[in-house]
Amino acid sequence: MIARLHPSLVAVHGGRSRLPIDLSASLNPLGPSEPALEAARSAELGSYPDPEAGPLAAAAAARHGIPSGTVVPVPGASWGLWFSVIAHAGPGLRCIALGPCFGEYRRAVEITGCRYEEIRTGLEEALGRDPDIVLVGNPANPAASVLSADQLAAACQGNQGTLFVVDEAFASFAPQGTSLIEDRVPPANAIVVRSLTKELGLPGLRMGYLIATEERATALRAMLPAWPLSAPALAAAVAGCGDLEHIRAGARVGRKHVLLMTEALARVGAEVCPSSANYLLFRARGLIKRLAARGIAGRDCASFGLPDHVRLAAPSPSELPVVLEAISG
């Protein structure tokens, strides 16, 4: 056992329901990207993949209009979050997460022995406590709220001694102006974590990347094990970075379906939080059980410290009528 690290149990997660419609995990409502899926199926399994996943770094850089040296390929956003924290946190340091938030934030920090705190009063309050690291979900999970890229960039500029780990797993589904990497490299004291599994609708293939300044990205890449992505995941990731129309279409459909669910939930008296992503959070006692009785799984948010709250992902076009009827019924 590595003495510097501290074992911690995996957090509660969605996406494993056996009900016919699973809205407990938030994915592209149009399903898998066909080019990415075909690339994964055609991947050469009799040879090792690129040991540094260099083709993904090049594809992600081209997608975002940034140098390839700023990209660090990782096997999924949760792994990227863990790696970012493991590389920078440790005993004697303090990490604050903006909550409510993804359960793996706490777990990653506690593994390092770093002091962890979750606050729900905003970024300004968090920075007022002088943390060494701030974890920000943008869009937030489960609330689907966002900070603008300009807000985050200004916060980074004004707090040079703090490392900002910005979880952009759902940024492709958020309004323009949310991401810190829209044709630019993030500030020197920031790491942006991106997921491909969600926007490409392929959660079974773990694929994502980090983006930071070239200096920080070079250091992070030097700490990666060889072959961070399997051959199918690497092939799908590269093809998916080129399938931007599927990603954009999924975002448009997601916003439309979230709006329709919001209206249906409001009609039955649920308290719905405004959403800027492909999922929404609401409070309605007992509704998750009623949806389950109709074959629809939602994400019970009690594990986020939100009793009676449910997070629902945007359903596919074929699932939408069933979901709306179940809510209304």
Image (cartoon, rainbow, N blue to C red):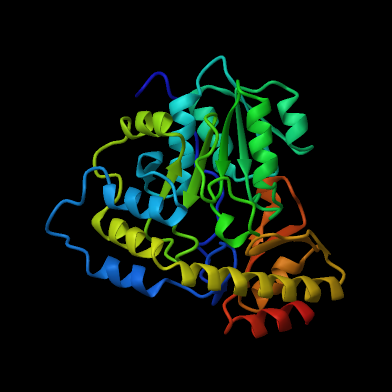
- Name which residue lies at 52% across and 61% down: 15
Which residue is more in the foreground, 13 or 277? 277
Quarter of the picture containing the C terminus is: bottom right
Name the side, left or right, on which 44 lies relative to 322: left
Q: Would you place residue 193 above or below residue 131 in this image?
A: below
Describe residue 1's horizontal placement relative to residue 194 as left or right: left
Residue 271 to residue 82: above or below: below
- Position of residue 124 in the picture relative to residue 233 (left or right): right
Counting the numbered discs, the total is 0
List the single residue furthest toward the left.
Answer: 46
Quadrant of the rendered image containing residue 149:
top right
Q: In the depicted view, which residue is nearer to us: 33 or 268? A: 33
User: For the N terminus, which image quadrant?
Assistant: top left
Q: What residue is drawn where x is 31% and y is 30%?
A: 222
Query: Eyeballing the image, is 103 above or below 63?
Result: above
Q: Vertically, is 164 above or below 14?
A: above
Residue 311 locus on image (x, y percent): 68, 60
Q: Position of residue 226 (x, y in %)?
A: 24, 39
The residue sitting at 87% across, 69% down in the picture is 269
Picture coordinates of residue 237, whole percent (x, y): 35, 59
In the image, 309 versus 171, the foreground residue is: 171
Which residue is more in the foreground, 307 or 34? 34
Residue 258 appears in the figure? yes
Which image quadrant for residue 263?
bottom right
Asked whether the viewer can see residue 96, the reply is no
Counting from the top left corner in percent of width and height, residue 325 is at 72, 84
Residue at x-position 38% and y-position 32%: 220
